[in-house]
Amino acid sequence: QQQVKQSPQSLIVQKGGISIINCAYENTAFDYFPWYQQFPGKGPALLIAIRPDVSEKKEGRFTISFNKSAKQFSLHIMDSQPGDSATYFCAASMSNSGSRLTFGEGTQLTVNP
Amino acid sequence: NAGVTQTPKFRVLKTGQSMTLLCAQDMNHEYMYWYRQDPGMGLRLIHYSVGEGTTAKGEVPDGYNVSRLKKQNFLLGLESAAPSQTSVYFCASSWANTEAFFGQGTRLTVV
């Protein structure tokens, strides 16, 4: 069963625009929520992560918004650039279960110049 | 720093053949993982290890076996490959509930 659901499956944004990707989770025991970025032919790499004791985390142009009561979190990419074109995965894990990550289905982002 | 290294990078197998994928990490991480990536399904956990000599099943373990004889290595075996195991396989390592570092992947095709 898919415990982390991600949307949209694909997203096209103009350069300078805002990209928003959403995820919803089911297991309230999750306590670590990372976002991974993957370029073609490469392995996923950590972009930004949040823990449930805060509602927002910002690193440069990337922001995670976290809503614990709704069991949802989202990635916002401000001033999107063509170099941001990649596949983005949300994930969740819990510290008492081997820290294994449960991934969303992925979002293919294309930023047009 | 090599990080997480996977070998081989590409492989074509015939149905019924066996093979072993090797993962090596040089970050002294306790936890290691094997995922498979299929279109539209994200990454799904096959097996994982929380320390040398330990292994555990993930979400999709059937048809795979693993071993962690040394802390830095995590091996994934396919005893009798099937076309359904055509996928891209990723190894990762981490400390507890922190950033997982991924290898470059192994693209496996079973014909």
Image (cartoon, helix red, strand yellow):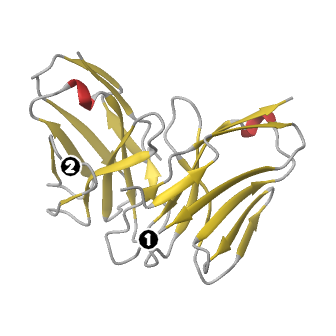
Circle 1 residue = B97
The x, y position of residue B28, in whole percent, is 35, 61
Task: Quadrant for the C terminus of chain A, please.
Answer: top right
> Quick check: A99 left or right of A50?
left
The correct choice, above or below, for A88 with respect to B15 in the image is below
Q: Earlier in the sequence, mark 1 or mark 2?
A: 2
Amino acid type at image mark 2? Pro
Looking at the rendered structure, whether the residues under marks 1 and 2 are on a common chain is answered as yes
The correct choice, above or below, for A48 with respect to A17 in the image is below
How many discs appear?
A: 2
The x, y position of residue A82, in whole percent, is 79, 34
Q: Secondary structure at mark 1?
A: loop
Where, by quadrant of the figure, is residue B106 drawn? top left
Do callouts 1 and 2 mark residues in contact (Cβ within 8 Å)? no
Q: Nearer the viewer, residue A29 or A26?
A: A26
The x, y position of residue A74, in whole percent, is 67, 61
Q: Residue at x 23, y 66 (%)?
A: B51
Circle 2 residue = B61
> Quick check: A7 left or right of B46?
right
Q: Nearer the viewer, residue B52 or A31?
A: A31
Q: Residue at x 46, y 53 (%)?
A: B101
